Structure formats: C-alpha cells, structure tokens
C-alpha cells in the first residue's frame, strides 16, 4: 500500500471513529407530558431498507431518537417485511447483538404500518399488523385499516390523488398530510395539500393534520413531524389520538395546523426540545467529510 | 495513480498493462475491491440519509447494501469465467472490479451533494439523472475488459458489454419494482 493510500485509509478511519465520538453528545429525549397528555413527536411516513428506504429499521430507531422523535411508523409500499425484521431485532434487545441492533433506542415507539400504494391514491395505514390489499378503492382500504384497529392517513394528497377520495373515503379518513417535503419551496403543492385538508375537515371536522418526512434517502426523518397528544404512551394511545384528531403539524412556512389549545401545547414542547443539547453538527459533518474524502482517496490514489 | 483510476481514464491501455500483472492474484486479494465497493455504497448512503457517520451506522449500512457488489459478481459471472488466456477467476474478478471507480465516485459525490445542499429541493432529480454518466462510462470500461481480458473481438465485446448493462439495469428495475411498486402507478398512468 502506498503512503498516499495509507493516509486515505487513516482519514477514513478517523472519520468513522470521530463521527462515533461526536454522536455520543446526543442526549436521550425524556418523555414529555403536558397536563393529561403525553406530547409525542412522531413521523408516520418512513420507508426503510427491506423496502425502498436506505436505512434498516434498527438504524431508523436510532436516527429517530437522535432527531427527538418519540414514535415512527414503518410504512413501506404494500408490504411489511421491515416490520417483521424490526420486531425480530427488537426482540434481541436483551442480548449483545440486540444492544447493537436496537437496545440503545428501545424507547422509540416503532409502529407497524404500510403505505398502501394504488394507482390513484397513497394511503398510510398506521398500527396495522397485516398488509392491506392495494387493489381496492380508497374507501375500501380505509375500512380495511380500521378493521385492524389502525389509523388511515391520506399520503401527500396533491391534486393528482383527489379523485380517488370520494365522499365515503373522505368520511372515513382519520387524517391527511398537510406538511410534506413535496411542498417544500413549492407553493402550488403546498396549497393543494392544505386545500385537501380543508375539504377533509368539511367531511370530517376532527380530521388530524399530519406532518411527515416520507423518508427514503434524504429529507431527514422528522423533517416534518406530527405532535400527538396521547392519553397513553403506546401504539394504541397514538392511534386513538390520531383518530380523535389530537395532532398538530407545522408546514414549511411554520404555520401550525390543529386545534389552538393543542398548538399551544405543541409550542411548549418545541421550546422544551430547543433546550436539549444536540450533538455537535460541525464535528458530525467534519467526520462525514473525512469518510468521503478517505474513500475517494482509496479509489484514486 | 491507482489501477482503478487508470482503468477509468484509459480502460484499454490500462487493462493491457494490468492484466499480465494480475496473473498471480489470490482470491483473498481479489475480494478487496468488492469489499471497498460495499464500504463506499454503505457509507455514502448512510451519510446521505443522516448527515453523519458512526461505526454502527456504517457497519449496518454496509451489511445491508453488500448485496450490490455480490449481485455485480453474479451479473458479471460470464466475464469472470476463464475462456481464453491464463488468467484465473480471482485475477479476472480483480480486474473486473477495477472498473468500479465511476459508480463509486458518483456515489460519494451524490452523498456530498445531497447531504450539504440546502433543504428538500429538486436536486434529487439531477442526482438520479446524472447516474447516466457512470452508467455509460462503465459500459465503455466493460467493453475494454471484454476486448483485452476476455480477448474477444470488438463486435463481441460490444455485445457483451451491452448485454451486461442490460442485465444490470434489469436487476435494478426488478429490485425497485419489488420494493417501491412503481408499476402500480405506471399502470394507472397508462390507463389515463
């Protein structure tokens, strides 16, 4: 190995080790309660590896914890393979393998879900144990989600998807995504998401506003998040809160959607989160740069 | 200049110079490049997704995405099978994986762009579209491999390179169809 390659290898290793050290500065978020509610920060639209996301479920847990999320839903397209894997890795939590895979982020609630992907609608089913058939109508899929005790959320309901949501479907929906990376910097799409949500509220006044990252490769998990006001800190508590409309979401302009009293609680939670010391972003970035440069050096030198 | 960079910049002359030197390559030595490719893919995707890297995150991502270089070995199996000459499978595999540089550098550059560009923009479309560059470049390298290492005639080398690219593309599309179900949306658009 030439001297230059050795330097590149050292740079790569320093980057990985440095990144690990930098990451230790992240404080574990404590459960947050306001009055009668647990105020949970959630992302209900997350894709994982063993799907078309790049991170495996156990790393999504860690990333969720790092980004101050209390609950995520694994929602791959029309299958739940990653849910099965998450359950298996989580069951190892007591073992040495498990402590690597899931143990240090076991406080994040990972809910089973599915992005029911049909031609003219995408529907998030949160808290469902079995895959929902995508070949049915939106109304049929919503009913199937409810039959499993889950919550049905319209995913990125831009104009393209509106026709699929007939009055029966609108009456059945529990919520809709009003904040989504699709609408980031795109006023037209942002207006379409809001218009759909207002139509939904016309049919279903307690419809839950939802903010999601739709994480695949980029758009960090929790970029847009939903604040849930749950009576119990459990999957059932989260579903009950969504179906009762007790959520708040913020869009890219900082506008809050949800009941005004809940918005005030969400604001208090956000102020509380702002006091959390985060891992140093510059040292994390520097480590990532070192890794990329080190690998480039190993290729080129 | 590394052999990988030499192959990237001048595939035919690089393979002509490197092929004789590769004759004694052991299997263990030949695995170094596929492992490097797995590390590149794993780390690049981990950084793109989180903006950071840790030992655990790197290991998890490398483990999950190691199927990519493994698939490359499968799709390139015909290239690795000795037909003429005295280069064994290990030497051929080492020479074959020397052509990884365009894709690996594209992954690293994409990771840097996606991680440190502002906000959720249309940049993803640009990054995906730019994949055409390493795809075409790899086709040229594959053709040179077939001509020099496989000692195939020019036309045969071009056919093999095209066939390999087609098989690789088919595998990628099959994977996407399996995990993202885009055919559902395509069907609907076709009906419209």
Image: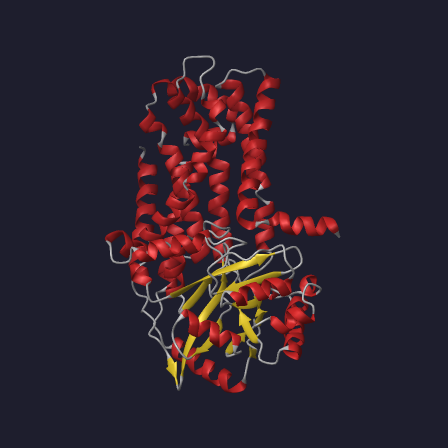
Q: Which residue is nearer to you in this view: B81 or B49?
A: B81
Residue B157 point in image, percent of width and height: 57, 20
**Is A24 left, or right, of B93 in this rendering?**
left
**Residue found 47% across the figure and 50% down from its top:** B111
A278 over B125 or under it: above or below: below
At 45% from the left and 55% from the top, the residue drawn is: B49
Query: In the image, is residue B41 above or below residue B89?
Result: below
Considering every residue shown, the one lying at the far front of the view is A147
The C terminus of chain A, quarter of image: top left
- Image quadrant holding the N terminus of chain A, namely top left
Q: Position of residue A167 (x, y in %)?
A: 69, 71
Q: Quadrant of residue A277?
A: bottom left
* Residue at screen point 48% across, 61% down: A113
The location of residue A187, given as percent across then percent down, is: 66, 69
Give the residue at x 55% y 29%.
B164
How many numbered discs? 0
């Amino acid at each position: 190995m030439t001297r230059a390659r050795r330097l590149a290898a050292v740079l790569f290793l320093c980057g990985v080790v440095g990144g690990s050290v930098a990451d230790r500065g992240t404080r574990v978020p404590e459960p947050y309660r306001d009055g009668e509610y647990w105020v949970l920060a959630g992302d209900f639209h997350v894709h994982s590896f063993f799907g078309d996301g790049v991170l495996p479920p156990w790393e999504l847990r860690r990333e969720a914890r790092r980004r101050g999320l209390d609950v995520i839903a694994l929602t791959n397209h029309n299958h739940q393979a990653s849910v099965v894997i998450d359950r298996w890795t989580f069951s190892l939590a007591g073992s040495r393998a498990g402590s690597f895979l899931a143990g240090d982020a076991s406080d994040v609630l990972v809910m089973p879900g599915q992005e029911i992907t049909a031609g003219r609608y995408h529907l998030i089913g949160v808290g469902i144990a079995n895959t929902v058939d995508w070949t049915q109508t939106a109304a049929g899929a919503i009913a199937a989600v409810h039959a499993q005790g889950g919550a049905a959320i319209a995913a990125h309901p831009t104009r393209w998807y509106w026709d699929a949501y007939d009055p029966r479907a609108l009456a059945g929906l529990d919520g809709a995504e009003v904040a989504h990376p699709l609408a980031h910097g795109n006023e037209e799409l942002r207006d379409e998401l809001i218009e759909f949500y207002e139509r939904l509220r016309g049919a279903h006044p307690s419809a839950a506003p939802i903010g999601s990252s739709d994480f695949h490769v980029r758009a960090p998990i929790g970029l847009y998040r939903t604040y849930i006001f749950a009576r119990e800190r459990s999957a059932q508590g989260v579903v009950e809160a969504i179906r009762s409309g007790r959520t708040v979401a913020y869009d890219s302009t900082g506008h809050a959607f949800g009941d005004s009293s809940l918005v005030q609680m969400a604001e208090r939670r956000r102020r509380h989160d702002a006091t959390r010391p985060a891992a140093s972003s510059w040292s994390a970035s520097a480590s990532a740069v070192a890794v990329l440069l080190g690998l480039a050096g190993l290729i080129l030198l | 200049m590394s052999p990988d960079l030499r192959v990237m910049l001048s595939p035919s002359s690089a393979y002509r110079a490197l092929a004789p030197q590769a004759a004694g390559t052991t299997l263990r030595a030949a695995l170094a490049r596929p492992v490097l490719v797995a590390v590149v893919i794993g780390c690049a995707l981990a950084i793109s997704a989180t903006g950071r890297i840790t030992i655990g995150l790197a290991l998890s991502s490398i483990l999950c995405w190691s199927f990519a270089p493994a698939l490359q070995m499968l799709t390139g199996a015909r290239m690795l099978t000795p037909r003429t000459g005295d280069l064994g499978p290990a030497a051929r595999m080492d020479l074959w994986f020397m052509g990884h540089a365009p894709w690996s550098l594209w992954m690293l550059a994409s990771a840097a762009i996606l991680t440190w560009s502002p906000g959720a923009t249309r940049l993803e479309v640009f990054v995906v579209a730019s994949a055409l560059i390493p795809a075409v470049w790899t086709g040229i390298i594959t053709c040179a491999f077939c001509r020099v290492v496989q000692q195939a005639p020019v036309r045969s080398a071009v056919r093999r390179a095209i066939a390999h690219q087609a098989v690789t593309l088919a595998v990628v599309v099959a994977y996407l169809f399996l995990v993202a179900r885009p055919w559902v949306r395509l069907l609907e658009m076709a009906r419209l």
